Amino acid sequence: MNLKVMSYKDKITEQFERFVLKSPKNKPKHLIHLHADFIELKTLFWAKDSWVTITDIITHYKDVIDSDIENDSEGNGTNNSDNDDKLKSKTLEIFDLIDERKNIFSDKYPFIIDEIHNRIKLKNDLTQENLLYLKLLLDSNLNNFSNVSNILTSEFETISAIALQNYLPNSTVEELGNNSVLKGNTKSKIKVLSKRLNVKRNKKEVKKLSKLANKEKGLDIIAYLPFEDKIASMIVVMAQCACGKGWSNKRGETESYESFLYFYKLRPIHSMFIPYGLTSNDNEGFLESDKLTNRLVFERKRIIENIQNLDFFNSLKSKEIVERCITFEYAEV
């Protein structure tokens, strides 16, 4: 039986046929950047030409924040008035982070914030940088975009590779995931990398890989800066791209390559690219910094600031998805 393969345009159409924005229930209450993302996403779909106020946010976000408050109270018998105060306090805390983002991202932030009246709306005239921000916002909420998640994640790798190339302009950067120019299974890719990096393979460990293994085993992007002398002592960056909420579970995957290849001169730098906004003015490091130890981290701010030329963005399918989000008439009132 011949099954019709859906084009990416068909996938985008299907994605928005019966689109319903899913609230971020069961998100850890201390990870306010996830809640801030949801409010931005809500604003993207809900407020085309009007403001989303703090009252709107409290009303439409009440079930999520209420669950946090119930967990906090631990059966201490808090009354409705106390809960209302906690609800407003929690919402204002999230809104404070959104207000920080306006300053952190400056003109690249796609929303207008009125901090006096605590309200937010989408800009009327969006730049390419604004669209890139929205693309990363969608990447951070893949549970809402299941029909096009493969497009979003694949092109997130492309964007990450460009950011890494700009960060290390003299390096050679290659994608090893879905967009890789290297063909074949993991074993064949490791063989090519051993030649390019001038390091030996650990044939015993490589042999353990399944013959059917055709993925990159956690290595999505590699960057290396070889010297003319070809000696293996060089800067090597091995990067994992992760969009899902469980991104921290993947943080050690690139380290497996230290068992496949003998980095006897200089160990590689392990890196993670994630679309989440972890920068905060009130934090000396990143939000969730405990999950980023010994990693070169590229989160939303670092990715955007390392993209100088956005001409490539016009050719991405993700741009069409972002534009559909902007023009989508959401039925919720």
Image (cartoon, rainbow, N blue to C red):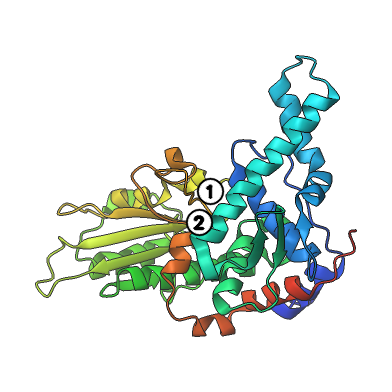
Screen quadrant of the C terminus: bottom right
Using the image as rendered, state which of residue 76 and residue 138 is in the foreground. 76
Element type where label 1 sits in the image: helix
Residue 42 is left or right of residue 202, and the answer is: right
Q: Quadrant of residue 198?
A: bottom left
Residue type, label 1: Trp
Residue bearing mark 1: 247
Visible in this render: residue 218?
yes
Q: Which mark is residue 274?
A: 2
Residue 293 is left or right of residue 329, and the answer is: left
Using the image as rendered, state which of residue 107 and residue 315 is in the foreground. 107
Residue type, label 2: Ile
- Where is residue 325? Give x, y as percent: 74, 70
Mark 1: few/some/many CA within 10 Å (<14, 14-19, 20+): some
Q: CA distance from mark 1 to mark 2?
A: 8 Å
Residue 57 is left or right of residue 213, and the answer is: right
What residue is shown at x 62% (from left), y 61% (from top)?
137
Determine contact: label 1, label 2, CB under 8 Å.
yes
- Where is residue 188? Give x, y as percent: 37, 66
- Where is residue 82? Give x, y as percent: 78, 25
